[in-house]
Image: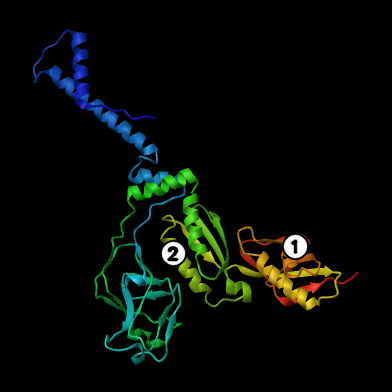
Amino acid sequence: MSQINLNRENIAINLTQKVAEATGIEKYSQSSKMKLLIDLLSDEITNLAQVYNSTVDSIYSDTALGPDLDVKGAEYGVYRKIRNSIYIDRADSMMRIRPKDSSQIFGDTILESITIPRGEIIDVGSSFYIVTSEEVNIIRADTSVMISGTIISSTDGGFNVNAGDTYEMTPRNRFIDNINTLLIEFLKPVAIDGGEETDDDFRERVLLARDGNNIATIAAIESVIISTPQLNGYSLLENKRGSGSLDVGIVTTELQRKSNDPNIDSTIRSIRSELRSIAPLGTNILIFRPEKLNLQIKFSTEQTTVSDNNIIDSILEAFKLAYRYSSMNNLFSTELEKFLSTILPEVSVVITNLDLYDEAIDAIISSSSNMVMAGTGYYMFLEEGDISREEDA
C-alpha cells in the first residue's frame, strides 16, 4: 500500500478551482463563508491523509514506530531490550577489588589467596550486581586486581556509579568469611539509563528477523555458547516451553570426561549473563545440565594379535571423536568404526550393539546395532567397564 502525498495549500487551490467551475463564483473575500468552507474541507482532507499514512506506516516493519514496531517485532519473535547492563573489560581499568585500607596488600586481610570463578555473582548491596566473565585471582601479595564482568541492574532500571565509589563484597558460602574485608572500587564512572532500546536499533533486529527467519538472533546466541571455554557440546531449543522460551543444554569437557564438573554452575551463570544482553527482551531462558545415560558397547573381532584391553581403550578414544552432545544427540556404530579404523588400523572391529542405560530407572531405554538416540535432557557417557567383547555363539 502506498502513501498519499498531499499538500494542504495545493488542496485549497484545487478546491477553489472546482468551486469556481461548479458555481461560477470566481471572486470572494478572505472572510467569506465560501473561503471558510474551503479551509475546513482542506484541513479535513489533510488530516484524513495523515491518518491514512500513519496507518500504512504501522503495517510495515520498515516504517512502524513505538508500540506498532513492538507488534511487528513480536510477529518475528523479537522483543525490545531494556538497557539494564553494561560489560566492562579489565583491560579498560574500570573496576577492581582491593582491601578496605588502600595502603594494605591482600595478605593483610585474607589468610589465603582466593579464586573467584568465571560466572560468579558478586553482590555489592546496591541497585546492581556484578557477574564475572573471567576468573579473578586474589593473590595475597597483590594490592588490587582488575575485574572483567557484566554489571546488571537489580531492578531493570538505571544506575549511576561515580569514579572512586566503593562497595563492600557480600560473603558467599563458597568463599572464606573475611572476603568482606575487601571492596569493589570503580576507577571510572559508569551509567545505565534503564531505558528501552530505540526504534532505530530495534528496527534493525526486527528486519534481520523478518528477512532471515530470526537467523541473526540465533546465530548470535550460538556464538556466545560456542565461545564458552571447555564446552564439549550443547543443545538449543526454541519455544519448547511455550512462545518466547529458549532451552539451552550444555555439557562441559569435564562433565563428559568424568560425569561430574564442580564448576558447571558457574559456567551456566556466565552463559546466562551473556545471553541476557543479546536475547530478545522477554525471552524465557533456561540453561541446564543434562542427565547422564550410560552407553554400553559390545564389539566383535576375529583378530587375536591385539588384546581386548587395547581395543577397549581405542573404542574409548573413538567415542570421544564420534560423539558430541547436541540437539540431534545420536551416535552411529558406523561412526565409531570409522574412527576405530584410524586409531587401530591393524585390527578389524565391528560394533555389534549399542545400549543406553538409565541409572535412575535401572533400565535400558535405547538399544540398537546401528544407532542410539537420546533426548536433549540427557548426554551419553562411556567408561571402560561398559565396553565388552561379544561372546562367541
User: Which x, y percent locates residue 47?
Assistant: 25, 30
Closer to viewer: mark 2 or mark 1: 1
Quadrant in the picture for residue 277: bottom left
Please say whether residue 94 is visible from this viewpoint: yes
Q: Which residue in the protein does label 2 denote?
A: 274
Amino acid type at circle 1 is Ser
Quarter the N terminus occupies:
top left
Tell me if residue 144 comes above or below residue 327 in the rendering.
below
- Helix, strand or loop under label 2: helix
Label 2 or label 1, whichever comes before in sequence order:
2
Quarter the C terminus occupies:
bottom right
Q: CA distance from mark 2 to mark 1?
A: 37 Å
Q: Which residue in the protein does label 1 denote?
A: 333
User: Which x, y percent locates residue 45?
Assistant: 25, 25
Q: Is residue 17 left or right of residue 205?
A: left
User: Which x, y percent locates residue 214?
Assistant: 48, 49
Q: Residue at image x 38%, y 46%? A: 203
Please say whether residue 355 is visible from this viewpoint: no
Amino acid type at circle 2 is Glu
User: Which x, y percent locates residue 199?
Assistant: 33, 48
Q: Is residue 39 left or right of residue 104?
A: left
